[in-house]
Each structure stands twice: as structure tokens, then as C-alpha cells.
Amino acid sequence: MDDGAADVVGIVLAAGAGRRFGRPKALVEYRGDRLVDRAVRLLRDGGCNRVLVVAGAAPLSVDDATVVDNPGWAEGMGSSVRVGLTAAGKAGTAGAAVLVPVDTPFLGADAVRRLISAYRGGATVVTATYGGKRGHPVLLGAEHWAAVAATAVGDVGARAFLAANRGLITPVACDDTGRPDDVDTPDALV
């Protein structure tokens, strides 16, 4: 990390009940690991100084991460984004956050590294792109957290903020780092 550069915190959005999947996705195992553990490792390996996991529908205990409870998890992903950004801000050292949903097990750590590199180069809103389309993960500079939280409602995370602030976005091609597919059903894990 550069001298004087603020920490980058990783936030795993893992509070949902996984209704379409049939159980909370954070607890689902894929290739011997729970999806939540894979997401934490993705962020750590990608260069995040610390990782927060936003839990809700299922209680979680996660190594190498701080679990933050979202009592309003049933409201949708927006509430988890708000809880995660609030928790990241309480430490006071984070200059940016990388957000990743727990149900994206095919992402690669190089995508996280590329987003952080763009942040270190001066970008404050960075999205991974795959085939020219925005995907996960997303990096948000701390100066935008309040605006993101204000628009994160229901099942909308940072999407509304990104749509309203296209000029702030630095897209980073991540086609060769993994796949942005999310897993909504057990069949998606094969």
C-alpha cells in the first residue's frame, strides 16, 4: 500500500435468505468452501486491508472478517449496502470500499486488484466490466458513501447511484479474471 493511501475495505453482501436458491446463499458450499468464505478470500487476495461481512437471514461466523448484523435484511440488498458502508465508515481509515455479493463465486482476485489499482490512480468509482458490460465487484470512494446509502433501497444496491453518476465511473475490463455470474439456483453452481 502507498504511504498515505487510505485503506480499502471489502464488503461482502451476505444477508439474504436466498429464496430462489432455497436457503441462505452465504452458507452454500461450492468446491469445499462456503460462498461467504470464498467471497472473503476473494477480497483479501485482491488487496483489501480488512473485510466486513453483512449478515442477516442466517447467523454467520467467518474467519478473517468482521461480521456485521443487518437487522433489516428482509428489506433487500439496499439495506445491506447501507449497513456495510456505515460499518466501514466507523473505523475512519477506509478511503474506499469494494462491494461484492456473496453469490458471485466465479469472480477472480485480479478483478479486485484492478479496481484497487484504479482507485490508487485517482478513480473514486470503479466498476469491473465483462464484455463491455458493468458487473461485480464495484469500488466506491468514501466521499460517495452517503450518496450511495441514500439511493440504496429495496433490492437496489449501488445501481441507482451508478446510473445517476455515470460520469464518475471508471470502467475496468476484467474479462480475463473470472466470470461475473451470480448463482440464483443450485443448478448455477455446476
Image: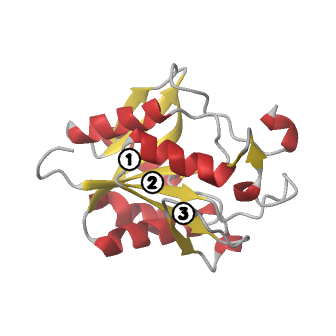
Dot 2, how many residues are within 10 Å of its Cα: few (below 14), some (14-19), or many (20+)? Answer: some
Q: Which residue is mark 3?
A: 53
Label 1, label 2: how far apart the Cα atoms are: 6 Å
Looking at the image, is 98 positioned above or below residue 50? above
Q: Which numbered disc flags the more N-terminal residue, 3 or 2?
A: 3
Q: Is residue 159 left or right of residue 166?
A: right
Of 161 and 77, nearer the camera is 77
Name which residue lies at 49% across and 62% down.
Answer: 65
Label 3, label 1: how far apart the Cα atoms are: 26 Å
Name which residue lies at 75% across and 42% down.
Answer: 30
Of 171 and 116, nearer the camera is 116
Q: Amino acid at mark 3?
A: Val
Q: Position of residue 100 (x, y in %)?
A: 54, 49
Name which residue lies at 77% across and 52% down.
Answer: 28
Q: Describe the colour scheme in one phrase.
A: secondary structure
Question: Label 1's element?
Answer: loop
Looking at the image, is 97 positioned above or below residue 71? above
Residue 161 badge: 2
Residue 97 badge: none
Label 3, label 2: how far apart the Cα atoms are: 22 Å
Q: Amino acid at mark 1?
A: Asn
Residue 165 badge: 1
Question: Label 3's element?
Answer: strand
Q: Position of residue 54 (x, y in %)?
A: 56, 66
- Answer with the quarter of the image where residue 7 lies: bottom left
Q: Is residue 8 left or right of residue 134?
A: left
